[in-house]
Image: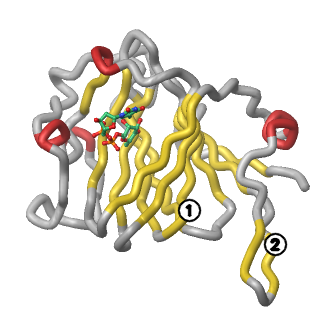
Amino acid sequence: MPVTSQPTSIEGVRLYESPVFRDDRGYFQELFNEAAFREAGLATTWVQDNISNSRKNVVRGLHYQLGRPQAKLVRVLRGAVIDYAVDLRRSSPTFGKHVAVELREGDGRALLVPIGFAHGFVSLEENTVMMYKVSDVHHPTGERTLLWNDPALQISWPISAAEAILSAKDLAGSPLATAETYP
Ligand SMILES: Cc1cn([C@H]2C[C@H](O)[C@@H](COP(=O)(O)OP(=O)(O)O[C@H]3O[C@@H](C)C(=O)[C@@H](O)[C@H]3O)O2)c(=O)[nH]c1=O
């Protein structure tokens, strides 16, 4: 069955949709079919699959890697998130701008976060499970965090800083003004 794709407000960030077959048992979906994604225009070679489980109001991000940058193909297996991709390509007309997309279990959707973007999400439900493919391996010394609630990003998060649950690393993220970026 074909995977369809649609653009977002930022060039290169795309939303893919796979058919979800529902019946009285529940649903079935092909999570990843290489040929179907290639037909839909996405021929990236993925080298690693990641999964995370988050309590409600967990914010992870906004993350990117220097040296070994990663494209990410992001979907939600349980619960729901608002997912964000922030353009960190200095030469881009949309530098500093972001796309926000709601992803939830059973929606058949996958968001492509290309190389050159920071990525993050907020979990809207308890035990939200996110799964994503990445195009390069984890490179701890190249990991960077863009400060999730830097006002310069103009992201309207659905929760306040007091409600958000973040890692120590993410609390200490860099604002856009001093963040290292991509060419
Ligand atoms: C990202 C990553 C982490 N780890 C380890 C390092 C650490 O001990 C533990 C938790 O790592 P973190 O706190 O960085 O996990 P997390 O905050 O979930 O990081 C992820 O956030 C989302 C938004 C992304 O876009 C991902 O690319 C990734 O950066 O897992 C790996 O072994 N491999 C990996 O690829």
Check the image and report above or below for 32 versus 67: below
Ligand 1 image-quadrant field: top left
Check the image and report above or below for 147 versus 176: below
Question: Dividing the image into 4 quarters, which one contains the N terminus?
Answer: bottom right
Horizontal relation, residue 12 to residue 165: left or right: right
* Residue 139, percent from left and from top: 38, 18
Please report the residue visible at 53 percent of the width from the left and 59 percent of the height from the top.
76
- Mark 2 — residue? 21
Check the image and report above or below for 180 versus 156: above
Residue type, numbered disc 2 = Phe
The circle on residue 77 is 1
Q: Are marks 2 and 1 in contact (CB under 8 Å)?
A: no
Horizontal relation, residue 70 to residue 1: left or right: left
Residue type, numbered disc 1 = Leu
* Residue 6, percent from left and from top: 70, 48
Please report the residue visible at 37 percent of the width from the left and 73 percent of the height from the top.
125
- Cβ of mark 2 under 8 Å from ligand 1: the answer is no
Please report the residue visible at 30 percent of the width from the left and 23 percent of the height from the top.
143
